[in-house]
Image (cartoon, grey):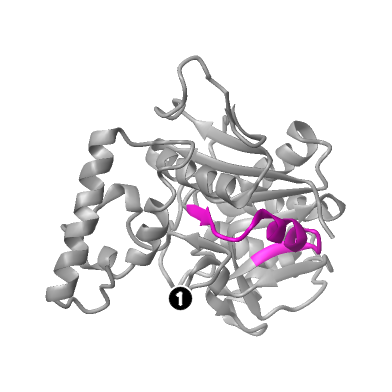
Amino acid sequence: MSAKIALCTLYEGDYHYGVAALANSLHAAGFMGNLWVGTRGERPPWMLPGSKDLLELDGGMRLEFVDIDTLYHFSHYKPWWIRRVLEDLDSSAQTAAYIDPDIVVKAPWQFFEDWTSWGISLVGDFFEAIPHNHLFRHHWRRLCAERGWSLAREDDRYYNCGFVGVPRTVSGFLGVWADLLEALPSLGLPIDQLLPTDALHPFRFTDQDLLNACLECGTWPMATLPPSAMDLRGQVGDVMCHMTPGAKPWRTGYFLGPKRWRERSHAGRQYWSFVDGPIRPYARGERLVRTLDQKAAAVLGRVYSVPGWKP
């Protein structure tokens, strides 16, 4: 099975570096079609002169930039953005898939076409298992009931929302997710902040917790993969690499980077392997400095052992 996928992402600020690597990885994977890029603020500095909202790459891939006007943090805006892409921007698509701008793709695009054709497409998170009787799930279900959504099933898996594929046939899922996110102020949580509270709060991972709460409000078909599909929990797979948690590769280096970054150099290597594609976000001089930085870290790693550091 296969499906025509309307692919989208959201970025602001220096996350354009991530968009560049993401787009290059999609191009290398054989993706053909539109990557809808929702953004606040200026266009990326790597855009070609005169191309304000459209960047066409060889092979039939296009980046189309769309201005987003919302008070929501972009992590909270995902269901609205996916629905807008599916209903307004690419109404011929069978499926809309959102992908975070700090992800690069490793699998051939045909894999994604098959995966997303089976149902809501998700990857297990760091906290892959949250039992159906977990305290937090009781809070999530109470919120769902208060918003008028009935419990349709009990789940014990917990999913990351860095990649979410939604077939048109189950697009009602997006309305439930959006409705739960609208309830954040009633929980005393701001809509414009990520991780606004502590680890004991049942809605700490606001957008992601509510995504998982939403999954219990319907019998939607699902197609899921383990955390290794995003290289999470130290499990390296062949599908994607999600550069989280920790500092983003474009914000820090290897040789002088903090220990927490060195421990996650796998994500950095994945990122840097895709910055020299059809989109080049770095000037030649800066790219040279970055390359030397990584080589210096590799040499140091051979003569000096840092726990967890794998340059």
Is 198 left, or right, of 156 in this rendering?
left
Query: Looking at the picture, does residue 213 appear above or below residue 281?
Result: below
Q: Which residue is drawn at 27% across and 77% down?
A: 308
Query: Looking at the picture, does residue 51 appear above or below residue 168?
Result: above
Q: Residue at x 60, y 52 (%)?
A: 29
Q: Which residue is drawn at 66% across and 57% down?
A: 164
| Residue 104, magenta (yes or no) | yes
Looking at the picture, tell me which residue is in the foreground, 41 or 216: 41
Q: Please state the total of marks drawn on the protein image.
A: 1
Q: Amino acid under label 1?
A: Arg
> Pointer 1: what residue?
233
For label 1, the SS is loop
User: Which quadrant would residue 154 be assigned to in this image?
Assistant: bottom right
Figure quadrant of the N terminus? bottom right
The magenta stretch is: 103-122
Q: How crowded is mark 1: few (under 14 residues within 10 Å), some or many (20 or more)?
A: few
